[in-house]
Image: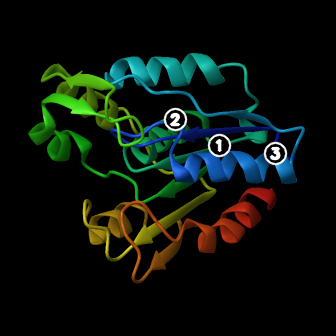
């Protein structure tokens, strides 16, 4: 079945205005103008984010949908793809967000809008643990783009978690995948191979 629906999930402190999300949206519009594209602003609560994602994709056909997630969005994307069995693409995905984000409890701002503030609450760490426990095996079709020079997450943990995926290990890139343009053709080709 051809790709009909594509979900993009941004990372912690990011938004649909991130460089990768905007670039992906433009490419999808140019290449697949009929495709249903959705890139929601995720709430700080992981439970609320999961609810929003689940409700927003509830009527999407599993065979025709794919989800792309960056960083924390990669964690959410993995959770959703494990539930739905859809195609998955992760970009420097968070593997243990409950552990990693526990030190970020408190007031935060987004990268794209520093004047926009939100509060990352202690209970959100427990919500991340609950989602991690509910995440099963990777779907059959999974591509992981992992930067060895990620300054935020350990690339070896990502590689181990996504060992069964199609791996694209990148040397010399960073957590934001500042060289995203170089990986876009491989991502689009992977999505097109149904």
Q: Earlier in the sequence, mark 1 or mark 2?
A: 2
* For discs 3 and 2, the disc positioned in front in the rendered view: 3
**Mark 2, residue position:** 80
Marks 3 and 2, how far apart at CA? 23 Å
User: Which image quadrant: the N terminus?
Assistant: top right
Q: Residue furthest bottom?
A: 171
Judged left or right of residue 184, residue 132 is left
Tell me which numbered mark, 3 or 2, is placed earlier along the sequence: 3
The alpha-carbon separation of the residues under discs 1 and 3 comes to: 21 Å
State which mark lies toward you, 1 or 3: 3
The residue drawn where x is 28% and y is 25% is 117
Badge number at residue 29: 3
First in sequence: mark 1 vs mark 3: 3
- The residue at which mark 1 appears reads as 86
Q: Eyeballing the image, is 100 above or below 53?
A: below
Q: Compared with residue 27, is residue 5 higher up or lower down, i.e. above or below?
A: above
Q: Residue 138, how many percent across, how many down?
A: 50, 51
Residue in the picture at 12% in, 38% down: 102
Q: Residues within 10 Å of mark 1 (few under 14, many from 20)?
A: many
| Nearer to us in this view, 140 or 74 | 74
């Amino acid at each position: 079945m051809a790709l009909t629906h594509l979900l993009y999930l941004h990372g912690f402190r990011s938004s649909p205005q991130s460089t990768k999300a905007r670039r992906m949206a433009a490419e999808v519009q140019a290449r697949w103008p009929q495709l249903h594209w959705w890139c929601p602003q995720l709430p700080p609560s992981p439970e609320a984010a999961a609810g929003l994602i689940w409700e927003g994709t509830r009527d999407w056909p599993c065979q025709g949908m794919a989800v792309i997630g960056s960083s924390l969005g990669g964690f959410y994307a993995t959770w959703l793809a494990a539930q739905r069995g859809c195609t998955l693409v992760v970009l420097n995905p968070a593997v243990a967000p409950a552990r990693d984000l526990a030190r970020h409890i408190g007031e935060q701002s987004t990268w794209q809008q520093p004047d926009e503030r939100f509060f990352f609450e202690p209970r959100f760490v427990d919500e991340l643990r609950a989602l991690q426990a509910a995440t099963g095996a990777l779907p059959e079709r999974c591509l992981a783009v992992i930067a060895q020079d990620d300054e935020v997450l350990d690339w070896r943990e990502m590689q181990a978690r996504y060992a069964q995926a199609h791996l694209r290990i990148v040397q010399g890139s960073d957590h934001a995948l500042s060289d995203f343009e170089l990986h876009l053709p491989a991502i689009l080709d992977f999505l097109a191979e149904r």
